[in-house]
Image (cartoon, helix red, strand yellow):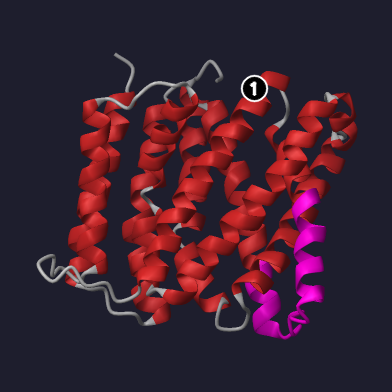
């Protein structure tokens, strides 16, 4: 973290808001792109675009070959993580969006903010505190309200597979984030180098899967635009903006709190662009999920 000044803190907020603005369009972008591609086709195109984005950035900075200084163990770990993220994580996430209304998949996906510290606790061999467990339960109650359309008494799910995939994606994201972060910190790596290595493993595997299953994408405008938008903005630029925001600021809680703007903004895009009516149960469930996330943020606030 930098020694923040008023100007760098303001710039950090600008970068953070830009990242949140991009992320808030993603639920709409995923659902729209899946009209033209299967989940596997979309992730393959998007991962290819993201790989090109990070490679171009590292070439422009003259740091593309910095990975040659890494230990063999770290290289293998970064390559192996490509199976977890982007390959498996985005396939599960896009499959959830393919099965669920965009608003439901989006709301459930934002519980990653609670899944992440729970997974981190497991890696550090420490049980989550009672407060952390209570906040997780509060958010998962929000999920139940969303997926049962507010009728908890019936406990009927419209699409169990989609719900399980959406929840599973948060677990995969938490696992990949914790392992990748530990690797980056241990080796003092550039996070973008680590991501390029992840994608370097994932991209040929994804194309091989499509070729083996005879499901190569049709290169029409919708398919290409979907892959380009998701790969460039969700997997690439938004990450760079967020990383720069966190590095520039000396008030990380203030910047990280911006993420709470993304779900309500996402609902606006879902309603206006996709024309998907926002259900009252979605709003109620999302409020509980956000309450759990705000509580988790408060627990992480420095004393």
Name the spot of residue 19 as percent of width and height, x first.
51, 48
> Magenta stretch: dominant SS?
helix
Q: Which residues are magenta?
A: 200-228
**Residue in the image at 34% along x and 47% along y:** 260
Which sits in the foreground, 12 or 101? 101
Name the spot of residue 177 as percent of width and height, x first.
56, 38
Is the C terminus in the top left, top right, bottom left or bottom right quadrant? Answer: top left
33 sits to left or right of 78? left
**Residue in the image at 76% along x and 83% along y:** 219
**Visible residue check, residue 269:** no
Q: Is residue 298 above or below residue 201?
A: above
Name the spot of residue 142 as percent of width and height, x first.
22, 55
Which residue is under mark 1? 185
44 sits to left or right of 30? right
112 sits to left or right of 136? right
Name the spot of residue 138 as percent of width and height, x first.
20, 45
Which sits in the foreground, 206 or 222? 206
């Amino acid at each position: 973290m930098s020694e923040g000044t008023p100007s760098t803190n303001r710039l950090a907020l600008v970068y953070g808001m830009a990242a949140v603005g991009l992320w808030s369009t993603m639920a709409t972008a995923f659902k729209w792109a899946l009209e033209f591609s299967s989940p596997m086709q979309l992730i393959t195109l998007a991962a290819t675009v993201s790989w090109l984005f990070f490679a171009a950035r590292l070439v422009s900075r003259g740091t593309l070959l910095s990975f040659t200084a890494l230990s063999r163990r770290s290289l293998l770990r970064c390559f192996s993580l490509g199976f977890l993220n982007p390959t498996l994580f985005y396939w599960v996430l896009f499959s959830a969006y393919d099965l669920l209304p965009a608003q439901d998949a989006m709301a459930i996906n934002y519980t990653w903010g609670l899944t992440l510290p729970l997974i981190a606790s497991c890696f550090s061999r420490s049980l989550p505190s009672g407060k952390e467990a209570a906040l997780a339960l509060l958010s998962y109650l929000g999920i139940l309200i969303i997926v049962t359309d507010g009728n908890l008494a019936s406990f009927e799910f419209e699409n169990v597979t989609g719900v399980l995939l959406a929840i599973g994606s948060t677990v995969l994201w938490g696992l990949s984030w914790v392992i990748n972060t530990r690797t980056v910190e241990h080796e003092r790596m550039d996070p973008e180098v680590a991501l390029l290595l992840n994608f370097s493993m994932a991209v040929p595997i994804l194309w091989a899967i499509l070729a083996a299953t005879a499901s190569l994408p049709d290169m029409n405008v919708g398919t290409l635009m979907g892959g380009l938008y998701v790969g460039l903005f969700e997997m690439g630029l938004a990450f760079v903006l967020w990383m720069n925001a966190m590095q520039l600021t000396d008030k990380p809680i203030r910047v990280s709190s911006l993420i709470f703007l993304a779900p309500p903004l996402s609902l606006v895009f879902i309603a206006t662009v996709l024309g998907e009516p926002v259900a009252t149960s979605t709003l109620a469930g999302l409020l509980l999920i956000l309450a759990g996330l705000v509580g988790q943020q408060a627990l992480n606030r420095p004393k």
